[in-house]
Amino acid sequence: MESWMVSNLVVAVLLVGGAWIAVAVSRHDIWRAAVQQVWKRRPGAVLVVCVYVLLALLDSVAWRGNVDTGSDVVAQHEAVTLLERLFGDAQEKSYSAPLADIEFYDHSPLKHPGSHLFGTDILGGDVFLMTLKGARVALLIGGLTSLIAIPLALLFGIPAGYFGKRIDDVVFFIMSTLASIPTLLLLISITVALGRSTLVVCFALAVTSWVGFCRIARGETMKLREMDYVHAARLMGASETTIILRHILPNLMHLVVITFVLMFSGLVLSEAVLAWLGIGVNGSWGLMIAKAKDELSRDPAVWWNVGGAGVGLFGLLLAVNFLGDAVRDALDPRTRKES
Amino acid sequence: MARLAESLTTGSGSGSDLSRRCQAMAWRSLLGLVAFACFGCSNSPYPEEDSDTKILYRSFEEAPKNLDPAYAYTTSATAILGRVYDTLLEYHYLKRPYQLIGGIAKEVPTAEVLDDGTIRYGFELRGEMLYQDDPCFAAYGGGATRQVLAGDLVFAFQRLADPLVNSPVFQSFANLKGFAEFAKALAERRKRDPAFRKLPPREQYRAVGGISGVVSEGPHHFELVLARPYPQILEWLAMHFSAPVPWEAVQHYDGKEGRDHFKDHPVGSGPYYLSEYAKESRYVLEKNLNWYGVKHPEWKAAGAVYPTSGAPGDEAHGLLPAEYVGKPLPFIERIVTVRDKESIPAFGKFLQGYYDSSGIVKESFDQLVRGDALSEEMSARGMKLEKSAKSDIFYLGFNMDDPVVGSAKGARSRALRQAMSLMVDVLEYTRVFTNGRGIPAQSPLPPGIFGYDAEYKNPFRTVDLKRAQALMVEAGYPGGIDPKTNKPLRLSFDTSDTSPDGGARFKFFVKAWRQLGISVEVSATDYNRFQKKMREGAFQIFQWGWVADYPDPENFMFLLWSKMSRKKSGGPNTANFSNAKYDELFLKMATRENDDRRMEIMKEMRTLLEHERPWIELYHRESYVLRHGWLKNVKAPGLSLPVSKYWDLDAAERGRRRTEWNRPIYWPAFLLLFMGLAIIAPGIRTFYQERQ
Amino acid sequence: MLAYVLRKLAYGGLTVLGVLLLIFVIFFAMARPDDVARRALGEKAQGAQIEKWKAKHGYDKPLWPTLAKPGGSLLQAHYVSLLSFEFGNSDLNDSPIGTTIRDGMGASLALTIPMFLSGLVLGLVLALFVAFFRETYIDTMGVFLCVLGMSVSILIYIIGSQFVFAKMLRWFPISGFDTDVIADGNWNLLLRFLALPVTVGVLSSFGGDTRFYRTVFVEEVNRDYVRTARAKGAGEMRVMLRHVLRNAMIPILTRVVVAIPFLFTGSLLLEAFFGIPGLGSITVDAIAGNDFSVLRVMVYIFALLFILAQIATDISYTLVDPRVRLE
């Protein structure tokens, strides 16, 4: 199976999963209320995040054939995503300014005059398209990393909190060991040692970020363990596994959501720094910024590359930050009581 | 401040008036404070007291790792070693084509063919010359310094042969009689005799018996004997590899504190010495008062006075000014070199006058250069532009050992290489990435090297999609489709350049080949992994560059000699090109004088390469060096030779210009302050109103 | 109390051992000593030279200890060299790592101490200010600015500030540093070099800090004792400074103490862009050159400082707040 088919499959799974979660949320009062509260407080942030997710999905659905790829012969044999199809062939030869009709330095006429909202880059690629495609990479980094980090954190955190003693000692030791190595250095060390690829970067990010969440999960489990209903379940003869799966895990879900949202912006920002060090993920905004940083000092300056990536990054992080606050207020029992 | 005092003394009157006045006073004192903070501002990165001295300021990006003259082979190290060590021969500063002159040797020797067929070169040293002052001399019972002796040259040559020194130019000196034998004997003796291994290098060399073709007679006579003709040896003598090295320095610094320090402590007899060396961040070269040019101006030695004649046109360019011709060197007192890792800030500092000369970063090229001349704004600032072709070649190479692109498939893979060569548009490449700087390369030879033919156009180095497509059919990949997989042919492009900038450049080639239906994947790995691939021959396409060591075609043609194959011998023939006909022709031309026959042989080699396409030649660099008007006597060298002993600078003029160009602008500070207050003030007011 | 401190120290020591194991796994299991040697000696190095180099750097030993031969492994050498602070020489340029780090420390501290102090003061003042005006437009704007500041990559700050303050307004040098300046006591020049990187460092971190301090302050402001104090007629300013600030000390202290190790290691990007030859700069060089020997030591030193800071935090808790039990 080829990668574009996998990508399509993932989209299908995500859509089904999303629908299932939506149904699940609408059935539970607490979750429904939380969603409504978030929507009421920050409708803008929710909308912006939705747009990013939509873009990422558009850029993940791909199929072969029936597309104008210009002079690129190979592309006719490759899968082209829905987003790219919407743009069609947008290739120029080199830099052009936003919405310009001519090339930036050469002043020769463009193939597609006036169609590049954010201009074109050094090889004539459309910056607007690249910016939009960056959404997929950012969500991929955030999503994939969380997909590794959160299960890892739960796997270590819940037993540590629930069983205590030896298990707790071991987990706590692993956590404090990992936490004592500075994030950036650990990130770099892992990527340098394992080689550079998207998966390795996500893995490194996961290794550096799961500890914080593990600590929270452990603490919360310790609290839940002493709850009346857990004691009751134990008296009724439920096994430890059942208690963890039926009673502890569901009550950690709000923490998972909060952590996920709060972790997200940090991950995308970390990738930008890695990109500057030459270990970024292909197609990310971080790489666009690192690539284009020198262009700012051209005279006249080429600002639209940094600008495009900056707007993409900034929009997402701003929305996610505000959304994160709103989600925390809506789900965290401490703040919920006060409001 | 005066106004502030005034408002204090006149401060009387009704209550509301007082408070208003206090407010006004607070405002003013705040503004005064900001102004005071700013008057201390300046963007000069140097101490004020240095501004009147003749100091040359330069920057470097990559720190030199090793300063052993026998080992170091990078531009960053040459910038130091070429100034600290004096060589037997030198190049004339102004004349082109390059012409050798005497360095510490009085004259350039002529070859003498001896009875047994060997070739002898004899050198007379100039007479009493001293090393720089260094504690290593006192450590072995000497004074602050000592004389340069012919024996030091012998020692330097022995170090070149020493396998433990691992000199990268060993092969070039192996034509000396007894050179390889000496290396072998040394290695063997070390292997079987542990006591011998503990001896200092000089005694080891002596015990083995030295190199028979490297002889000193008395303090000032030195001889080299070649086993076979190799006229290029003289060019090597103009480089730091064969400069005299005092044995005391090696013995004193190597092994001190358990490690080899000599490579951080160059001790030479050149016009400058290394006075401060903070490896990764900065180094300072100071004028060497022991240098023979300073001690003996009356000798009027060729390498120690400003030349009296030059190439045609030099006079018109002001390179032979009356106040300098025949004057003793060097003119500049000190050279301060500071590390600037990022090129943009470094260039910014050059524009502000804090570096004296600089290359042009591509980002600023369009601002500075119009056509071939400096823009008016920059000329008005007194800046000068030096343009020169570099003796180098940048190329894409195929791994000739590879089953798909290499020679195994014969005519089919040749057609593939030819087709790919026809797709790479160098003019477009230089336009996009180097501001059009660079001469499209037709063969490995750059302009200025014997054998370069400006008329020659390589038929496979133009862009021709139709012909390339036809060749793809011939190669068995019609439309780029690999019949085995029924998909576009997949190739890999290997590189250790993981920078985003490199990524864009490789994508340029990938895009070109995609038009043929070839899908090339760029695999950018770290250096270790890349080198491993190179060694094992597990790569298909790569990009490489070669900068000439000396101006001779042999230095380029040997890059494709099968003996230099990367896979077999670790040599610089990275393409692993191996062609019997080529090797035969190469051996014929390698040691010939520059005559018509040599030209003919090289034409034959050119045709062979044109057809075989182990390389896709890209371009020869053109260097644009900018300098400020206060830096004088600058002629750009095409070879990487440090020539700053001929330069001079006008420190007073520089100081004046720096102040003129760098007056700080203060008003935005006030604007910012005002804006901040404007935003906060109404808030504070409403707050107090609410409270009351 | 003493038992508590000792226990903390022992646990810290154990963590150091764990960190060392992790470093070993990352760096030694991944890189082949032969490749490292070739990288250091150049492509033309021959077998004998590589062996000699490996022996000199101690890379000729087996990686893990075995039952048959428990001593003399690379793992053991790794522990011994790092724990005894005998870092040896760099793989790449053979300079002694210990000296390199000592030299770099000064430049790093010169940059980070002013950055740390001004960042702390500015962050606290801004947070107090915003908390003081909570639920007015200043508060909203403050939070917005903080999020804005957090969302911009530090790269943009660096490039932008070099362009505006050094090139256009010409207030400070674009980049540069001179370690002699500290020794010579040329404060004017030192100030000139540091002004821009310190400003950028403070700018890039004030968003997160201020937002954090503000949350702490606002939480504290809503407590009962503050209301009591206010009811008793204490002025708002007095309430903020005397009660709120003092009671918010614990969370602030945690954040501050944990940040102290970063003082020693400087900031990777700031040092690289402003040409300051500190530890951050050394680290960037080591990354660019794949110099694992230096990177390994940097990770170790950083972890060590971090663990020490953690212990210091725990102990200082007990001093600041008697309610913290010594368990």
Image: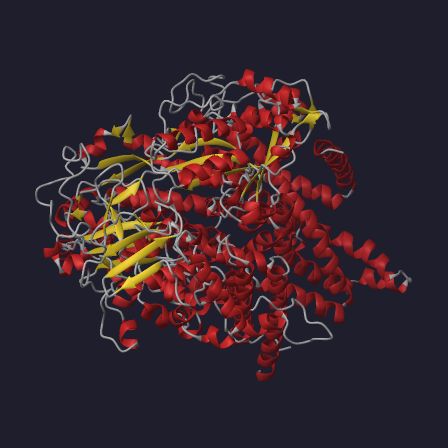
Q: Is residue A236 left or right of residue C104?
A: right
Q: From this viewpoint, is residue A30 visible? A: yes
The x, y position of residue B150, in whole percent, is 27, 63
The image quarter containing residue A172 is bottom right
Q: Residue most toward the front?
A: B115
> Which is nearer the eye, C23 or B150?
B150
The x, y position of residue B20, in whole percent, is 23, 50
> Which is nearer the eye, A305 or B686?
A305
B336 above or below C170? below
The x, y position of residue B84, in whole percent, is 28, 58
B39 above or below B460? below
The image quarter containing residue A156 is bottom right
> Which is nearer the eye, C301 or B142?
B142
Q: Residue at x 60, y 62 (%)?
A: A179
User: In the picture, which quadrant includes the N terminus of chain A?
Assistant: top right
The image quarter containing residue B418 is top right
Q: Is residue B678 left or right of residue B396?
A: left
Q: Is residue C14 left or right of residue B550?
A: right
The x, y position of residue A23, in whole percent, is 78, 37
Which colouring convention does the figure follow? secondary structure
Q: Residue most toward the right?
A: A237
> Which is nearer the eye, C220 or B230?
B230
Q: From this viewpoint, is residue C175 visible? A: no
Q: Residue most toward the left?
A: B322
Total marks drawn? 0
